[in-house]
Amino acid sequence: MNEILRKIPSVDEILKSSSVQALIREHSRQLVVAELQSCLAEIRRQAATGSEPESSLDDSLARLPELLRDRIAARTAPSLKKVINATGVILHTNVGRAPLPAAMIDAIRETATSYSNLEYDTATASRGHRDAHLEKRLGSLLGCEAATVVNNNAAALFLILKALASGKKVLVSRGELVEIGGSFRIPEILESSGAILREVGTTNKTRLADYRNAIDSQVGLILRVHPSNYRMIGFTERPELAELVSLSRESAIPLVKDAGSGYLFRSELPCLASEPVVSDALRAGVDLVCFSGDKLLGGPQAGLIVGRQPLVERVRRDPLMRICRVDKITYAALDWVLVQYAKGRHLESLPVYRSLAASTEELRSRGEILAGRLSGSGFTCEQKDGVSVVGGGAAPGETIPTPLLHVRSERFSANTIEAHLRLFEPPIVTRIDDDSLVVDLRTVMPEDDGVLADAFSSLASR
């Protein structure tokens, strides 16, 4: 063993080689030395344990510059990277929810790579307010008096509760005390904000009288929550939004609606027929509405608050607003998305709506082409009728008819195929059903169909 260890050159000696010097110029001496020391420590460990034959250790020493380059490449590779979503969950939280269109990235590049007028009024040469970049846009679209933006919808709801109801009771139906994902629960958000939860009604039945009977001088807010991720059916009841608006006006207690998914305007998509619509809530007279930016709005992660100017201003003035505010890139991205709505082009320009609206004929045709390519690599493919889902807490219980591609192989199990695709570059996320690897093209960008074929082909060539 000692003889093997004596073969291992010193760090200084290796650093003098031209290949390693090239790595230092490309990266840094500190990074190269750290990875080199790690490589040598691994070789010494293998030699000490005798787990590898001497010829293998000699090979590792001969390939040291190559191994070093691979280690540095792995260490400096982006941790956050593209993933192809073939699961059929359109707003898949684990893979980033709404994908953003390339046209939007092109449009905001200049803002992102330079200084901007984020908080500078060029007309008056004075300090401006970042909300000015979206408030007029949202006012024109939704008819709201004011608007502000924070980093996500949970923050939006928290700030509303803290600014408007800290130390006061908030009336919430027991059927709306939901968990909104990531173990965040409405009662916990209420408690953290300093507001006091006052449950009304029962889990399955809440009547207007339940709200009315709970009103006293300590009530600061009436809250209506989007029942994200679940739906109650059967023996259920809850007041119409218009009834809560009337109660709010009668009692002079603000009504806030957490609209969750950010579905701005009603469309003809059947799967969204029961989804709460932001514009409908504002027209009905709700005082404040909050919603997500990266779900059915189709934009970046954000929480938007729209409604009456005095209430929005109270949220803006809260000290925690500075903690929750968003940066110039988010404002620029949201502005681009809202322009698509203003132009009436959002159904065509936003990937979320293209996926929602893709026809079964289009998806079946793409599936046939992909199946033809896979059969050439030794896979057996069959298209079967199935469903996709909206995801992201939107349209719970609703499904979208979709032809699904079921892939089998005599050589590889479904689990082996799934793992290979998941570890491919870029990773491809799929699902397994009835011992078949299932590919749902509704959530795959058409330009990535070829990448899918290449991933299967690389497995077949093993």
Image (tube, rainbow, N blue to C red):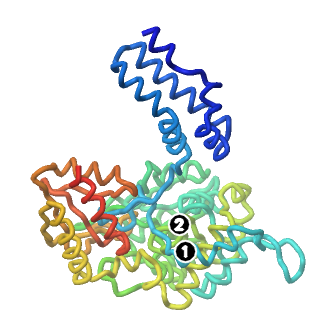
Question: Closer to the camera, 437 or 409?
Answer: 409
| Image mark for residue 19 | none
Task: Tell me the crowding category of disc 2: few under 14, some 14 to 19, or many 20 or more residues within 10 angstroms, Cα based.
Answer: many
Query: Residue 152 sits in which quadrant?
Result: bottom right
Location of residue 270 in the rendering, given as x and y in whole percent from the top left corner = 30, 82
Residue, x 52% and y 72% (percent of image)?
Answer: 299
Name the residue carrying label 1: 248
Q: Residue at x 53, y 27 (%)?
A: 38
Compared across the picture, whether 264 is left or right of 370 comes to right
Q: Residues at badges 2 and 1 in contact (C-beta under 8 Å)?
A: yes
Q: CA distance from mark 2 to mark 1?
A: 7 Å
Residue 276 % position (x, y): 42, 75
Q: Does any portion of residue 246 appear in the rendered image? A: no
Depicted 398 relative to depicted 59: above or below: below
Query: Label 1 is placed on what type of residue?
Result: Ser
In the image shown, does 421 or 131 lie closer to the viewer? 421
Rendered location of residue 109, percent (x, y): 64, 72
In the image, farthest residue toward the front: 18
Q: Nearer the viewer, residue 388 or 372?
A: 372
Q: Is residue 232 visible?
A: yes
| Residue 222: assigned label | 2
SS assignment at label 1:
helix
Give the side of residue 128 with respect to residue 78, left or right: right
Q: Is residue 419 above or below residue 448?
A: above
Q: Residue furthest top?
A: 2
Residue 302 coordinates in the image, percent (x, y): 57, 65
User: Which is more N-terminal, label 1 or label 2?
Assistant: 2
Quarter residue 166 falls in:
bottom right
Residues packed near mark 1 inside 10 Å, few (<14), some (14 to 19) or many (20 plus): many
- Please, what secondary structure does the residue beneath circle 2 have? strand
